[in-house]
Image: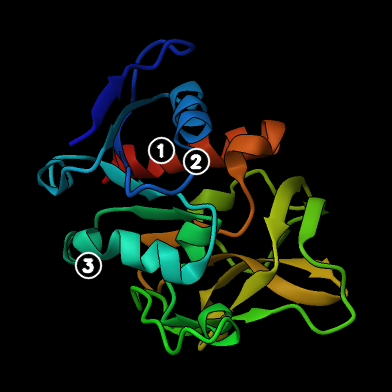
């Protein structure tokens, strides 16, 4: 079991307690640092018993969809329970893709159908043939629907590194879009708005990312 608690040091005090799920993938240090700067008291843990007492849960992720879902297998029920409780659940990059139902990535790799968390019904698809992948670098966020996560970021730029993107079953799940020859969802959320994810890395996105993390901490503090 790995567990590390870090208190916010650059703010007057933590405004919410946030659990970052340590399932073996993801840049935990930079995510933790970003959340601390945003005012959160952060616990990095692989212990699901800590989930219910947190104000919010972050599912980071870097890597392939199948590996992510295999590693996150022991946490599936706890994450689904958190969503059922209405606890804010925030997926980042691969973590966002894992919130959906499935991904073409596993099929393209000959790994068959891999089940995602299905908290936001939909599928992750690869950018079209001929497009440069991965989509890497800074790109614009265009807000499509109201959500507290995107307060103050319409038209701002965030940092992306990905070859697949989300195609939710419902257009209502799309919070922001970004143009990369195709317009793709860069932030998605469930109908209740309590489960959401960013395709980009807020912890690497400068002031825009910090604003999103602050918005997340505010959401957690209000729950």
Front in this rendered view, residue 107 or 8:
107
**Residue 218 found in image quarter:** top left
The crowd level at tag 1 (other Cα within 10 Å; few <14, some 14-19, many 20+) is some
Query: Which mark, residue 185?
Result: none
Q: Is residue 146 left or right of residue 195?
A: right
Query: Which mark, residue 215?
Result: 2
The crowd level at tag 2 (other Cα within 10 Å; few <14, some 14-19, many 20+) is some
At a point 14% along the width and 41% down the height, the residue shown is 50
N-terminal label among 3 and 2 = 3
The crowd level at tag 3 (other Cα within 10 Å; few <14, some 14-19, many 20+) is some
Question: Is there any visible trace of residue 189 in the rendered image?
Answer: no
The mark closer to the camera, 3 or 1, is 3
How far is mark 3 from mark 2, CA to CA?
23 Å
Element at badge 3?
A: helix
Query: Which mark, residue 80?
Result: 3
Q: Give how far across and how far down residue 181 sits, in percent.
A: 88, 75
Labels 1 and 2 touching (C-beta < 8 A)? yes
Q: Give how far across and how far down residue 143 sits, in percent.
A: 68, 62
Element at badge 2?
A: helix
At a point 84% along the width and 69% down the height, the residue shown is 180
The mark closer to the camera, 3 or 2, is 3
């Amino acid at each position: 079991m790995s567990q590390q608690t870090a208190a916010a040091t650059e703010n007057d005090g933590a405004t919410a307690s946030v659990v970052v799920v340590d399932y073996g993938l993801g840049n935990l240090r930079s995510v933790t640092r970003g959340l601390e700067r945003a005012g959160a008291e952060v616990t990095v843990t692989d212990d699901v018993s800590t989930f219910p007492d947190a104000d919010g849960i972050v599912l980071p992720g870097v890597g392939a969809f199948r590996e992510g879902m295999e590693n996150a297998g022991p946490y599936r029920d706890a994450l689904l329970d958190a969503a059922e409780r209405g606890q804010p659940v925030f997926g980042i990059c691969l973590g966002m893709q894992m919130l959906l139902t499935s991904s073409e990535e596993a099929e393209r790799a000959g790994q068959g159908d891999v089940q995602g968390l299905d908290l936001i019904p939909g599928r992750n698809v690869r950018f079209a043939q001929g497009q440069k992948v991965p989509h890497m670098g800074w790109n614009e966020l265009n807000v499509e629907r109201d959500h507290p996560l995107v307060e103050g970021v319409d038209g701002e730029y965030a940092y992306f590194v990905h070859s697949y993107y989300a195609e939710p079953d419902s257009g209502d799940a799309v919070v922001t879009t970004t143009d990369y020859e195709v317009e793709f969802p860069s932030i998605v959320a469930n109908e209740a708005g309590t489960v959401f994810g960013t395709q980009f890395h807020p912890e690497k996105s400068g002031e825009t990312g910090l604003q999103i993390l602050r918005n997340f901490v505010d959401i957690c503090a209000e729950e």
